[in-house]
Image: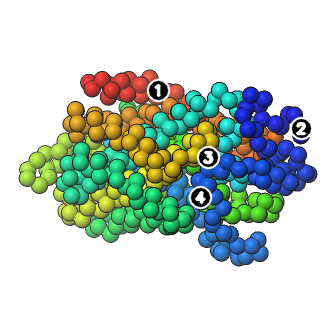
Amino acid sequence: MNSETSAPKDCEDPTPGPAESASSTGQGAVKSGVENYDRRSLQDMHGSVAVPSNKAGFWQQWKAFAGPAILISVGYMDPGNWGTDLAGGALYKYRLLWVVALASLMAVFLQVISARLGVATGKDLAQCCRDYYPRWTRWPNWIAMEIAIAATDLAESLGSAVALNLLFHIPILWAIVITAADVLVLLSLQGLGMRKIEAVVTVFVGTIAVCYGIEIFVLPQIRPDFIEIGEALFRPEFREAGMLLVAIGMIGATVMPHNLYLHSALVQTRKLERNDESIRKAIRFNTIDSATALSIAFLVNAAILILAAMVFYGKNSVTVAGGQVVTFSGDSDWIRIAHLTLAPLLGTALASTLFAVALLASGQSSTITGTLAGQVVMEGFMNWRIRPWIRRVISRLLAVVPAILIIGFRGTSSVTDLVNLSQVILCIALPFAMFPLLHFTSSRKIMGKWVNGWFLKTVGWGSVLFITAMDIYSMPESLREAWRIIVGH
């Protein structure tokens, strides 16, 4: 074995990568790496989905590979995104739509690269970090991702709880307790197999899309100006005070660190032959899957911003049922305001109901992927295997218990603060996922012939550096906001 391509000497259980002992095509390397690699994340679902032969038609093959990116896409339209999209549309109309498009485009590139890593190496991102980085890096990397996953789960739980409160008038505190039980749903789904999980999440995503489709295109009070929308997509600007900060929030809420780990594991649920043609096919169809699913996520986020722009922009307040006046400001809880005011502004209670149903679907679908990601990073970094239901309960308690305590002491007004805090944590954790991902996939020693080409290297590193720069720029204010939330004033 070439000493240059082996894992660091202080790295425990090093496993050959595709470039080690590589043949001229790289085929033998990928095969040997997988054969010697028995630490598979999501082991009960690994290679569980059959794919047709290489001679099968396009649609038959696409159908077999479609699914992992749908699970990933829900992280790009989760409740954490809703607040920034609603605020952007309400405060600046369509002028930040280009930011939504840019963030979504960068997300496509990063998820395509993540899927490529999983297919080419037979390892997920956490396993690569374990095998190719020094042993001492495992604990900080794993802890950082567990905190990020707990923060994500916090936002999903709060989103689902708010939706239950809006739909059924369940007190927020009890609604959060109820969301803790949805972990049982995931356990039952995992027993049915990966395709069933993908089908359920697809239904959730479809529910979100249909709800917004009805609100924008069916309800008669709304008439989008598509020419103005099209111009906003291709006209970057930060002319008004505060636009830059909202834009940074949009970008920070879009790319989720746990998704980069999860996607590289989910693509391995397909049962592949370890040869060049099969790997090339898998990379191709996972690229199509990623572009398609994240395009849907972009349309949902764009729809949220457009709806907010059409019904809130230019208004200072609205009177709701019972004579209550709801005032709009830059610090408003836009999720609650949207639900309260859509009915009087659009003249139908259906608008508010559709909004809450979409929010519930968003929270529940994101919860499924968040708990799967927790299992991937624990098994990948630490090679710890515990019963799935224990892993799910731990993941959910890490999110729900702090939420219950804070809301119990400080009241429901702290819900928005908690969502904001979760986004600050994700902002800090994101480089722990992006830089290793681009490092591994840009290395021929690890990827062999499947190393990123010049285009993926350019757009990948460009996205990583741009997002990191935005994170650093917003970090002082984010930390001040986090401290304010923690101390309670």
Numbered disc in front, either 1 or 4: 4
**Residue at the disc numbered 4:** 44
Q: Earlier in the sequence, mark 2 or mark 3?
A: 2
Which residue does the numbered mark 2 point to in the structure image? Answer: 2
**Please, what is the three-letter code of the amino acid marked with disc 1?**
Met
Q: Is residue 63 above or below residue 99?
A: below
- Front: mark 2 or 1: 2
- Give coordinates of residue 442: x percent, y percent: 74, 41
Q: Residues within 10 Å of mark 2 (few under 14, many from 20)?
A: few
Question: Residues under labels 2 and 3: Cα distance?
Answer: 30 Å
Q: Quadrant of the N terminus?
A: top right
Q: Quadrant of the C terminus?
A: top left
Please indicate whether residue 134 sits to the left or right of residue 28 in the image: left
Res 226 seen here: no
Q: CA distance from mark 3 to mark 1?
A: 22 Å
Labelled pair 2, 1 in contact (Cβ < 8 Å): no
In contact (CB < 8 Å): disc 4 and disc 3: no
Of the residues under marks 2 and 4, which one precedes in the sequence? 2
Q: Nearer the viewer, residue 366 or 35?
A: 35
Kind of residue at disc 3 = Leu
**Mark 1 near mark 4, Cβ–Cβ under 8 Å?**
no
At 26% from the left and 50% from the top, the residue drawn is: 175
Give SS at disc 2.
loop
Which disc number belongs to residue 110?
Answer: 3
Gap between marks 1 and 4 measured at Cα? 40 Å
Crowdedness near tag 3: few (<14), some (14–19) or many (≥20) residues, C-alpha within 10 Å: many
Q: CA distance from mark 2 to mark 4?
A: 33 Å
Mark 1 or mark 2, which is nearer the start of the sequence? Answer: 2
Q: Position of residue 383 (x, y in %)?
A: 62, 42
Query: Considering only order in the chain, which callout, 3 or 4, is on the residue closer to the N terminus?
Result: 4
Find residue 475 and name its label. Answer: 1
